Image: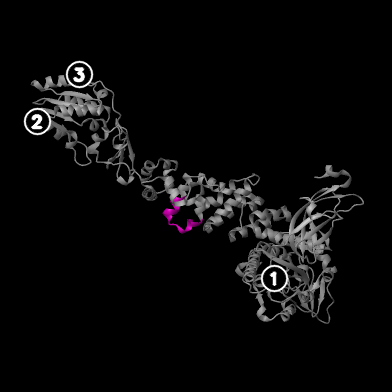
């Protein structure tokens, strides 16, 4: 039926005396408006269902029906559809039939909205009083129930109270419609209307920005989502990120501020990291993708690396990214300890997952080295620690002394110190040197070397008990700081005790001497429970390296300020860790008790010199790892004896590096202008390998190193130097280091060797 026929039919109905109601079902809002306009005249009375509702309540049907039956004029009953359909099909059908069956004294016209599917009754006589307009239905919007206007996007005006629900379904252009109500969706399980519910700030935030739904609601509490809603309201996540962090691609750049934020701010930052997981930091992306609870963020930063295979091509990158992230936030000690305990399940490979950021991790490194260190070579550990523990890598790094005995001895010594073991071949070397004592021939006394050094404008740094073992570490640290070194290796006086080794103090005014006893204290007293009775691990090395790094930094600071021209680092004697961990030591019985943990012993007239001891004036000094009876065992390290690590000491001149120095490597017969990018030299049975180099600054006592082998460098004049490489006979590509006064001035200079007969075809 169309609207005209409908009106004609209703007009005829109104002219009769009727006691039975009529029903008109309309499909469009505009049609309703036309009917209302047409019949709001004369004596006609319009009764709205919503007028029988209290605030945010459903209709009082009993009162409504009573008023209908007592009405004195024609009634047009409106707004009922939404209040019926919210209860479902059966309820709507029952109520509509009840209204159609109602006895009224005057005309009674029921106007419904889109109820034609529910106008199905067993009593077919009712159909004669039903008019259904045949027109296209207006869409009915979705309806959101929520208990606070704070949960609504700022550009939407809500409807207050379920008593206005009919207004909601009449606004197809306003989809969805928000109703502020205490009613819950689950109270209307059969509703024919599409009811949704915003019962939490999280759901409200999903409405503000649907991107929110990509994060599970359990990622935050209601109060946290409320905080986010208030922060984001009126904008969206992208605008918030752009405003506060610059861009969603650089969110990780704000991590250093993390610990300065409130808990809510920290949580909101983690939310943005999850929503915009596009950081260039791949490790952070991995962590955030799997993070389910914000409280696990720090522990996830620690643990996620354990899922990465060290053989993966991305492993080194992921490790560095993780270490960078951990260095930017406060590390929870319990998370750190839990990680250290967990990572041990990886056995020897756990060393690849630890960092040098915390004391706990460093100590765990030494625990693992004690268990698995022998399964790695020194070179392998140096390479591994270059990634994970650079200080330990620097300590292990190769240093080429002018004598191969020193190079080999201290390479092995440092390796065994960190793995906490004495290897048989090294024990034999110590035993051999306890007889030969070659250091007496290859090392000059300290006072001799010291007298050669220009001390004008110098500050002397006396570091007690700093042996030659630390030279590679000091060289690396000073190189990083832009400092130039001139290294002299010499020997101390025996016994290797401080009181016999302070002759250098008379060479410098006391105000130009800085004495540092902390290293010796570490070795003697076992501060912070580092002594051998508390732990068998060499974890004191952690503090030793930190101390030496601090000294290097302090020297750089003074040199930069111009407080002095150069620093001279000097020591009285070295010390031995391996003598302490030697579990198979022999106790040497003498007439007098041993002193200084048994490393030396006062002579008596009845003594016969022990095989492994050297004459040290009034003392005997042991040159192996045995111990004289009558003295307690050392705590951490020991000195007083005559092993190489106790006797060999460095004198290191430190100055600001001359950054203008340049080294050019080239074949002997070529000039700089004609030299190749990578010098190539041809060798044969008669023609030996040789190169020359040009230096923009004078080199003192220069030498070259290729594959840990030292080669002589001699001046040629005018800044040129000749390099004798006659021991190199195999065609290959090589790297050459240049040293001046024991300090490296050029590193990894490439050159090639080819066979003379092969010409260019042999070039690798």
Is residue 245 toward the left or the right of residue 464 in the image? left
**Dot 2: what SS?**
loop
- Mark 2 Cα shell of 10 Å, populated few (<14), some (14-19), many (≥20): some
Is 262 in the magenta? Answer: yes
Pick the front one: 462 or 537: 462
**Residue 517: x and y, percent?**
65, 74
In the picture, the quarter occupied by the C terminus is top right
Image point (28%, 25%), residue name:
137
Kindly identify which residue carries mark 2: 71
**Residue 403: x and y, percent?**
82, 64
Is residue 16 toward the left or the right of residue 608 in the image? left
State how far apart marks 3 and 1 are (Cα): 110 Å
**Dot 3: what SS?**
helix
State how far apart marks 2 and 3 are (Cα): 24 Å
Q: Give the mark nearer the N terminus: 1 vs 2.
A: 2
Kindly identify which residue carries mark 3: 127
Examine the rendered structure and indicate whether residue 12 appears above or below residue 239. Answer: above
Kindly identify which residue carries mark 1: 634
Q: Give the mark nearer the N terminus: 3 vs 1.
A: 3
Farthest residue, direction right = 686
**Residue 661: x and y, percent?**
72, 62
């Amino acid at each position: 039926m169309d609207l005209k026929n409908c009106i004609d039919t209703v007009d005829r109905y109104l002219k009769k005396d009727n006691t039975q109601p009529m029903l008109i079902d309309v499909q469009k809002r505009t049609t309703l408006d036309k009917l209302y306009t047409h019949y709001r005249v004369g004596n006609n009375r319009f009764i709205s269902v919503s007028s029988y509702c209290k605030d945010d309540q459903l209709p009082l049907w009993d009162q409504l029906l009573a008023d209908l039956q007592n009405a004195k004029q024609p009634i047009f009953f409106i707004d009922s559809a939404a209040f019926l359909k919210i209860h479902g099909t059966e309820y709507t059908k029952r109520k509509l039939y009840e209204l159609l069956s109602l006895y009224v004294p005057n005309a009674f016209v029921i106007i419904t909205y889109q109820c034609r599917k529910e106008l199905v009754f067993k009593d077919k006589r009712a159909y004669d009083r039903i008019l259904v307009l045949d027109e296209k239905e207006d869409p009915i919007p979705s309806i959101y129930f929520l208990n606070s206007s704070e949960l609504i996007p700022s550009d939407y005006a809500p409807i207050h109270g379920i008593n206005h629900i009919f207004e909601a379904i009449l606004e197809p252009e306003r989809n969805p419609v928000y109703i502020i109500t205490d009613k819950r969706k689950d109270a209307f399980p059969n509703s024919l209307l599409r009811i949704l519910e915003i019962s939490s700030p999280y759901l409200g935030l999903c409405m503000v920005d649907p991107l929110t739904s990509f994060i599970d609601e359990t990622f935050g509490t209601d109060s946290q989502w409320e905080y986010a809603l208030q922060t984001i309201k009126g904008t969206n996540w992208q605008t918030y990120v752009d405003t506060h962090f610059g861009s969603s691609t650089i969110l990780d750049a704000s991590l250093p501020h993390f610990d300065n934020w409130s808990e809510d701010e920290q949580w909101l930052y983690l939310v943005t990291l999850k929503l915009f997981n596009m950081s260039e930091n791949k490790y952070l992306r991995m962590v955030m993708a799997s993070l389910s609870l914000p409280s696990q963020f720090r522990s996830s930063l620690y643990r996620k690396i354990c899922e990465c295979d060290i053989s993966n091509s991305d492993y080194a990158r992921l490790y560095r990214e993780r270490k960078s992230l951990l260095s930017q936030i406060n590390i929870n000690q319990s998370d750190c300890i839990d990680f250290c305990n967990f990572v041990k399940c990886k056995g020897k490979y756990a060393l690849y997952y630890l960092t040098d950021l915390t004391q706990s991790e460093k100590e765990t490194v030494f625990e693992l080295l004690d268990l698995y260190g022998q399964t790695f070579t020194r070179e392998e550990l140096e390479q591994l620690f270059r990634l994970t523990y650079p200080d330990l890598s620097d300590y292990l790094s190769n240093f080429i002394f002018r004598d191969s005995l020193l190079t080999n001895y201290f390479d092995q010594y440092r390796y065994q110190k960190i793995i906490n073991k004495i290897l048989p071949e090294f024990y034999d070397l110590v035993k051999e040197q306890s007889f030969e004592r070659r250091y007496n021939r290859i090392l000059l006394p300290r006072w001799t070397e010291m007298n050669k050094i220009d001390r004008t404008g110098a500050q002397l740094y006396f570091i007690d008990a700093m042996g030659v073992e630390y030279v590679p570490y000091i060289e690396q640290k000073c190189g990083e700081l832009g400092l130039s070194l001139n290294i002299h290796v010499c020997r101390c006086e025996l016994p290797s005790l401080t009181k016999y080794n302070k002759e250098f103090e008379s060479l410098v005014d006391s105000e130009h001497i800085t004495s540092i006893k902390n290293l010796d204290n570490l070795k003697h007293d076992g501060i912070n429970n580092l002594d051998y009775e508390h732990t068998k691990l060499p974890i004191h090395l952690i503090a030793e390296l930190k101390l030496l790094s601090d000294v290097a930094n302090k020297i750089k600071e003074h040199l930069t300020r111009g407080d002095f021209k150069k620093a001279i680092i000097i020591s009285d004697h070295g010390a031995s860790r391996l003598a302490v961990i030697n579990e198979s030591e022999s106790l040497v019985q003498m007439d007098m008790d041993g002193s200084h943990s048994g490393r030396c012993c006062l002579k008596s007239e009845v003594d016969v010199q022990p095989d492994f001891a050297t004459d040290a004036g009034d003392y005997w000094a042991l040159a192996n790892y045995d111990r004289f009876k009558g003295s307690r065992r050392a705590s951490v390290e020991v000195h007083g004896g005559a092993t190489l690590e106790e006797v060999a000491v460095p004198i290191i001149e430190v100055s600001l590096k001359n950054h203008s120095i340049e080294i050019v490597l080239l074949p002997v017969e070529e000039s700089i202008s004609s030299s190749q990018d990578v010098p190539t030299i041809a060798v044969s049975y008669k023609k030996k390998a040789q190169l020359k180099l040009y230096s923009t600054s004078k080199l003192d006592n220069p030498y070259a190193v290729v594959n840990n082998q030292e080669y002589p460098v001699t001046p040629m004049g005018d800044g040129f130097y000749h390099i004798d490489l006659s021991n190199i006979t195999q065609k290959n590509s090589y790297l050459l280091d240049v040293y001046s006064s024991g300090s490296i001035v050029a590193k990894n200079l490439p050159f090639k060797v080819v066979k003379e007969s092969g010409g260019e075809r042999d070039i690798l």
